[in-house]
Amino acid sequence: MAENKTEVSFVRRRPVLSLLVLTALVSVPFVLFPQLDLAFSRLFFVPGEGFPATNMDILKTVREAGQDALRLAGLVVLISLLVPLVIAPARFLLAPRAALFLLTSLALGPGLLVNGILKEFWGRARPRNVVDFGGDLTFSRAWEIVNTCHSNCSFVSGEASSAMWFMALAMIAPLAWRLRAALAAFVFALVMSVNRIAFGGHFLSDVLLAWLLTLAVTVICYNVFYKDFGLTDERVDNWFARARAFLQAPFRLLLNR
């Protein structure tokens, strides 16, 4: 019991390090036994047909709904940042600090790390394109840098990363709703991610590692905006007030002529 309490305490005190350690632990079996990825994807593969889920309208709708949810969330965040820059003392659903946290974590996690770096430079072919599932490309294991795929590749999953980013909303939800919001975000990420595996778009390791890396980046951003640097809503509001005054200054000069 004491050991369990110590482990929980360490995770709470060092969440980023804990996530990075977990990422390494999850990576080990996929690196040492790459057939795990093939075996899991084979559950959704039918010889002669490929990945049948690709042709199921309901699963296509699920994927589109997930993409629309991300677009809507991004739009709300952007408007929440732009409105206070134009109208004082306006608010749009989110306080500026919350909107900055969400935008930064989205840009650095799913945006830069996943889609900008890993998917562009690791070169892993998607399941539906490898020889094992009727394609013409060579299978490669997780974390292996190859030139099999040249752009928007399989490692890691961009949509799984974007879905897990919704956990950032749970982090800033009211305390009474935080656990339920986190569970909802996890279920959303699970559905979206399994859907991508069923489509032959990603391997299991692509999804799991996308989740963990996205969570690590999100927690880092949360610490920056809510813990480590002493930022407060009032302080961020003052930044926006100065920015608003700077942006409105030319128009005031024109009106006073």
Image (tube, rainbow, N blue to C red):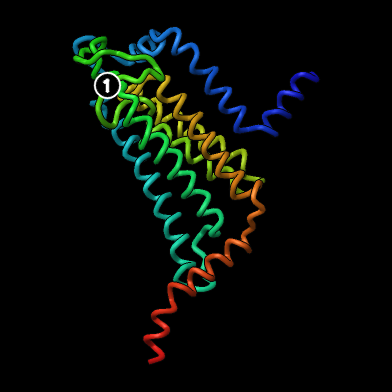
Q: Residue at x 53, y 45 (%)?
A: 169
Placement of 220 over or under 82, stated as above or below: above
Quadrant of the rendered image containing residue 170: top right
Q: Which residue is mark 1?
A: 147
Viewer-nearest residue: 251 or 44: 251
Q: Residue at x 41, y 50 (%)?
A: 74
For badge 1, the amino acid type reads: Asn
Q: Position of residue 205 (x, y in %)?
A: 42, 20
Quadrant holding the C terminus: bottom left
Q: Position of residue 97 (x, y in %)?
A: 56, 56
Viewer-nearest residue: 26 or 164: 26
Q: Is residue 49 visible?
A: no
Quadrant of the rendered image containing residue 65: top left
Q: Residue at x 62, y 42 (%)?
A: 178
The residue carrying pointer 1 sits among few (fewer than 14), some (14 to 19) or many (20 or more) residues within 10 Å by Cα, namely: few
Q: Position of residue 114 (x, y in %)?
A: 40, 34
Give the total number of marks visible in the rendering: 1
Quadrant of the rendered image containing residue 120: top left
